[in-house]
């Protein structure tokens, strides 16, 4: 396995929330995991996080995505045990940042299907808690992305978005009943040719059916928790939270279109 580091391309403030850190992301290209065409059926999976399966997941460690990010990715901020993935944000100097934070991504890439995560987010201004798919220049592909982003300044809402070849501007804020920080909530999207449908707790909250705004390239699945001192309009002003921030993921699943649902609460069950 050969690892190639793609250095970040930092977005300008004008391009941001047409986001993104991950268009600029310093991720590793896993040449042992070739790109999947959309007509190649990726395997379904359900991950319950009894442990961290390093055959499936790669943990970001030792870099950041640009000057706008006030923390350094650390493998110590990503742990899985007893059925919960824990991603943390901590005040500790790591390289040239005052904070450390966590991110992980699948090694494989997934195409059209049902993507689902059950998670709880922290609440804190200046912080982003995210579940999304992404592929981009680090993998020698255009920047394609589908998002759930909890802007933790207001955990009563989650931001939905998509990018095609680096072009976004499809943001939509939807309510998370009871608050994303008060308990576990289910976030899901159905990605198919020419359409994306987003769900919160099993309820359809948004449909995007403009084919020019729907990604086509198989992508990796990401979870991340990070902060910023500079994106005040988007994330809110950052201040030291005075404690460790914790994002918890109880479950993540992928079900290819047309395949049986894998657990009773799955959105995929509604599509059959």
Image (cartoon, helix red, strand yellow):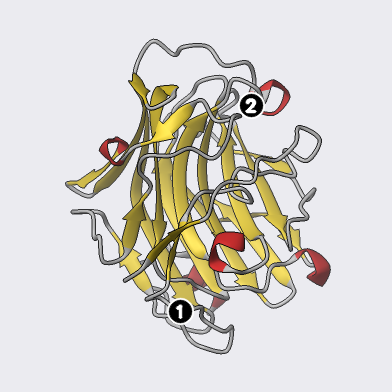
* Separation (CA) of disc 1 from disc 2: 35 Å
Q: Is residue 215 visible?
A: yes
Quadrant where the N terminus sits is: bottom left
Image height of 47 relative to 26, above or below: below
Image height of 151 relative to 42, above or below: above
Image height of 57 relative to 26, above or below: below
50 or 218, nearer to the observer = 218
**Local secondary structure at mark 1:** loop
Image mark for residue 34: 1
Image mark for residue 235: 2
165 or 259, nearer to the observer = 165
**Residue 222, image x, y percentages:** 46, 53
- Residue shown at 56%/19% (left/top)? 125
**In the figure, residue 217 lies in which quadrant?**
bottom right
Label tally: 2
**Residue 135, image x, y percentages:** 57, 63
> Left or right: where does residue 252 sit relative to residue 204?
left
């Amino acid at each position: 396995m050969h690892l190639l580091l793609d250095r970040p391309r930092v977005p300008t403030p004008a391009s941001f929330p047409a986001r993104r850190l991950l268009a600029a992301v310093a991720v590793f290209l896993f040449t042992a995991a070739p790109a999947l065409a959309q007509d190649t059926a990726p395997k379904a999976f359900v991950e319950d996080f009894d442990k961290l399966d390093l055959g499936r997941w790669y943990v970001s460690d030792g870099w950041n995505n640009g000057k706008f990010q006030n923390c350094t990715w650390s493998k110590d901020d990503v742990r899985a045990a007893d059925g919960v993935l824990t991603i943390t944000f901590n005040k500790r100097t790591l390289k040239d940042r005052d904070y450390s934070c966590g991110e992980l991504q699948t090694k494989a890439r997934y195409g059209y299907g049902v993507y689902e995560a059950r998670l709880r987010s922290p609440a804190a201004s200046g912080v982003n808690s995210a579940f999304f798919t992404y592929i981009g220049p680090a993998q020698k592909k255009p920047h394609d992305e589908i998002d759930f982003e909890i802007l933790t300044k207001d955990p009563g809402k989650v931001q939905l978005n998509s990018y095609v070849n680096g072009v976004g501007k499809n943001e939509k804020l939807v309510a998370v009943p009871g608050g994303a920080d008060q308990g576990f909530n289910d976030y899901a999207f159905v990605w198919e040719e020419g359409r994306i449908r987003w769900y919160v707790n099993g309820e359809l909250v948004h449909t995007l059916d403009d084919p020019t705004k729907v990604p086509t390239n198989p992508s990796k699945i990401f979870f991340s928790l990070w902060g910023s001192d500079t994106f005040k309009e988007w994330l809110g002003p950052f201040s030291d939270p005075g404690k460790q921030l914790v994002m918890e993921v109880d479950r993540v699943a992928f079900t290819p279109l047309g395949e049986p649902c894998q657990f009773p609460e799955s959105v995929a069950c509604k599509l059959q």
